[in-house]
Image: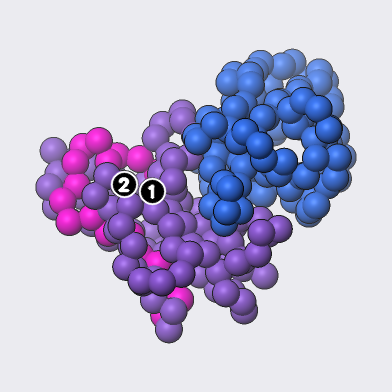
Amino acid sequence: AQSVTQLDSQVPVFEEAPVELRCNYSSSVSVYLFWYVQYPNQGLQLLLKYLSGSTLVKGINGFEAEFNKSQTSFHLRKPSVHISDTAEYFCAVRQDSSASKIIFGSGTRLSIRP
Amino acid sequence: NAGVMQNPRHLVRRRGQEARLRCSPMKGHSHVYWYRQLPEEGLKFMVYLQKENIIDESGMPKERFSAEFPKEGPSILRIQQVVRGDSAAYFCASPDASGNTIYFGEGSWLTVV
């Protein structure tokens, strides 16, 4: 079975500062990894995904994440945040099988201070 | 949401009533997932359906909850005799053409009063 741990429930950051949202996963099989963003009272939007290949993946809105197999991590980063990045961010894992469900972390609330 | 359609967006039910939430997956796709998000919490898997078949229902509560995905029409998540604790956002998701990436709908917010 897979599981996902997001170490920080809340991350306050000043505008234009860099940010890293941490995510660790556990799985005994190969997995796909995802980051989703949820703005207040809205659905989930896919930020980026790692399926295979390059361990550094780039997503929308200037975000990127690096897959580190040895540390079982998939941390999300952005070099300079904007007020509009205020949202809840969810890391997720899925077994690399078309019939598997996606498991979410508990989420990290990113709040941007002016 | 890449074409995953959910309705209603908001639903208010009194305790004891039934709630029906509908989901149409991405066009041409026949698999849907249902997730529940309780207030201030993450998303919890409920059920994974293929048309006319339940693939994985390991996250479904044992009582009052059911899901179906008929040959024709949307998938339906049905909650009978709702209680206050059922108040949550219910999200439907569908895989893309490759089957690797899952896209979510905008959600249905159920409020039980």
Q: Nearer the viewer, residue B40 or A55?
A: A55
> Which chain is depicted blue?
B
Q: How is the image coloured?
A: by chain
Q: Position of residue B58 (x, y in %)?
A: 78, 54
In the image: residue A25, left or right of residue B63: left
- Which mark, residue B65? none
Quadrant in the picture for the C terminus of chain B: top right
Q: Which residue does the image show at 48% across and 64% down from the upper left?
A: A51
Q: Which residue does the image show at 78% across and 53% down from the upper left?
A: B56
Q: Position of residue B50 (x, y in %)?
A: 78, 44
Q: Which residue does the image show at 57% across and 46% down from the upper left?
A: B96
Q: Amino acid at mark 2?
A: Ile
Q: Amino acid at mark 1?
A: Leu
Residue B79 can be seen, yes or no: no
In the image: residue A54, left or right of residue B66: left
Vertical position of residue B110 compared to residue B71: above or below = above
| Chain containing mark 1 | A
- Find disc 2 in the rendering and name its residue: A60
Element type where label 2 sits in the image: helix
Do discs 2 and 1 belong to a common subunit? Answer: yes
- Find disc 1 in the rendering and name its residue: A47
| Chain containing mark 2 | A
> Which chain is depicted purple?
A
Gap in Å between the C-alphas at discs 2 and 1? 6 Å
Label pair 2/1, CB-CB below 8 angstroms: yes
Q: Position of residue B51 (x, y in %)?
A: 80, 40
* Mark 2 burial class by Cα count in 10 Å: few <14, some 14-19, many 20+: few
In the image: residue A86, left or right of residue A7: left
Q: Tell me the magenta residue range.
A: A71-89
Vertical position of residue B25 compared to residue A10: above or below = above
Q: Position of residue B5 (x, y in %)?
A: 59, 27
Q: Earlier in the sequence, mark 2 or mark 1?
A: 1
